[in-house]
Amino acid sequence: MASRKRHTTVEPFALEHTNIVTGDDEGRTLHDMTIVIDESGRISDVMPSPQIAVPQGYHRIDASGKFVASGLINMHVHLFADGKPIDPRQATPRGQALLAGLVRTPVGRAYIRKKAISGLDTLLNSGVTTIRTVGDVGYTVVGLRDKIAAGKLLGPRVFASGPMLASPGGHGAPLVALECKDEEAARRNAEANIDHGVNAIKIAATGGITDSQVAGEAGSPQMDVASMRTICDAAHACGLIVAAHAQSPEGVMNALTAGVDTIEHGSELTDEMIALFHENPNSLHGYSSLIPTLSAGMSINAFPREVTGITEIQYENSKPVAEGMLEGARQAHMNGIRVGVGTDTGMTFVTQYATWRELYLLTHYAGFTAAEAFYAATRVNAEILGIGGETGSIEVGKCADLLVLDADPTQNLRTLAAPKLVVAAGRPVWRPSVKRFDDIDRRLDERL
């Protein structure tokens, strides 16, 4: 794995004689092009190779036969786990309470920080140059985000949510969520997150699979609309978008009505929901988006319990939720809703290095073409995050968030699994590599 302490200063360079993947939804490719990256880490020139003069002193990299694409964006990341099966005993109320106490000790905080740094390193080496965390243990990721932005740590651009905001005893509480007993508590907790420097907010609108203890808990509405509206108003006043974990039609509708900007996971959609996705007067930008996270829903549902380690209740709860997520993704695609890409990294069988699998699942199960899936993971995600002017495509003036690949990902998504070079804000990761879990990869390859 590439060292995190190397290449934290930007040395100007050029990628010559390469093929540029434009990243539009048609999958166009430009041939024999040169991309120039200046000392600020931005793209200063993009032209056909015969027409460009690389400035003197720039490092020149011959990328003949390779394809250069925009770095991937993962909108749904957790950095406290790595994708190995989660022990169901840790997902009980007692287990979460014990863990919540442990991670607040000096040893626990050090462990969480080490885990988060490892996750950031793995994501970057796998070709992800921007992430949004949506449920953190405390505010460790906020500090790491600032170190990356200051060039003191090599990593992806980070939108850090801090802890989720949940109902008392709700999804993620108390380990990765602050509990909101009423509207006033919801406002205070949202403001506490903002005061700690988060640049994203996450709400648990419904119950979830991994910590469900009774039949039907996953997807059951938890936080009320008024409390969610209070959180959205506080976040939107600071220009922050709000995500909502929502895994049932009622939960999705409640979250949309409250004004959330992204629905995480999702469900089967009604005409009323579809209309709110397109025009949501209470959201930050006037619309809401869907982040289906098929990697999490389909992985946990595709294998017997003895493989994933989940309880019988969690397994039964996963079936209707996973089916609803998949149907919602199909409907969203068919109805022109903005669909972004997030994987739910850290959950069972969702590794930090396999963002490309989400694109694959969108094409094989939700009706996307490979070009549309790649477009969603780059340009659409950048638009949703409000950073379309900074990243998401290869254009003059944008940050140099780039991948050098063996093949065109709009024709072969699997090439994204092994980038030859990753560039994050102009900082190269030479010979990127990750530690893989061969048993997990083999099972996913065979089943999905």
Image (cartoon, grey):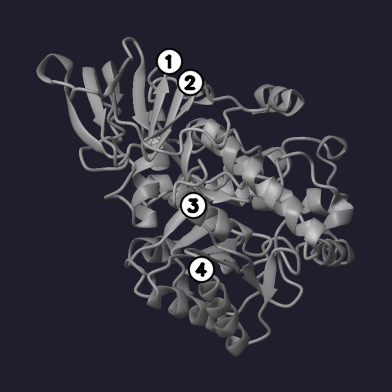
Which callout, 2 or 3, points to the residue nearer the camera? 3
Confirm whether residue 336 shows in the render: no
- Name the residue located 56 percent from the left edge and 32 percent from the top edge: 357
Which residue position holds label 3?
158
Mark identifier at residue 135: none
Closer to the N terminus: mark 1 or mark 2? 1
Which residue position holds label 4?
197
> As drawn, is 369 to the left or to the right of 146?
left
Contact, CB < 8 Å: mark 4 with mark 1?
no
The C terminus - image quarter: top right
- Name the residue located 71 percent from the left edge and 37 percent from the top edge: 349
Contact, CB < 8 Å: mark 3 with mark 4?
no
Q: What element carries label 1?
A: loop
In the figure, residue 218 lies in which quadrant? bottom right
Q: Along the line of sight, which residue is nearer the eye, 393 or 57?
A: 57
Closer to the N terminus: mark 4 or mark 2? 4
Residue 300 placed where, x, y %?
72, 42
Q: Residues within 10 Å of mark 2 (few under 14, many from 20)?
A: some
Which callout, 4 or 2, points to the residue nearer the camera? 4
Mark identifier at residue 406: 1
Q: Residues within 10 Å of mark 4 (few under 14, many from 20)?
A: some
Closer to the N terminus: mark 2 or mark 3? 3
Q: Residues within 10 Å of mark 1 (few under 14, many from 20)?
A: some
Instruction: Measure how far apart labels 2 and 3 are at the Cα level.
Output: 24 Å
Residue 329 placed where, x, y %?
49, 47
Q: In this view, does 436 lie above or below 289?
A: above
Number of labels in the image equals 4
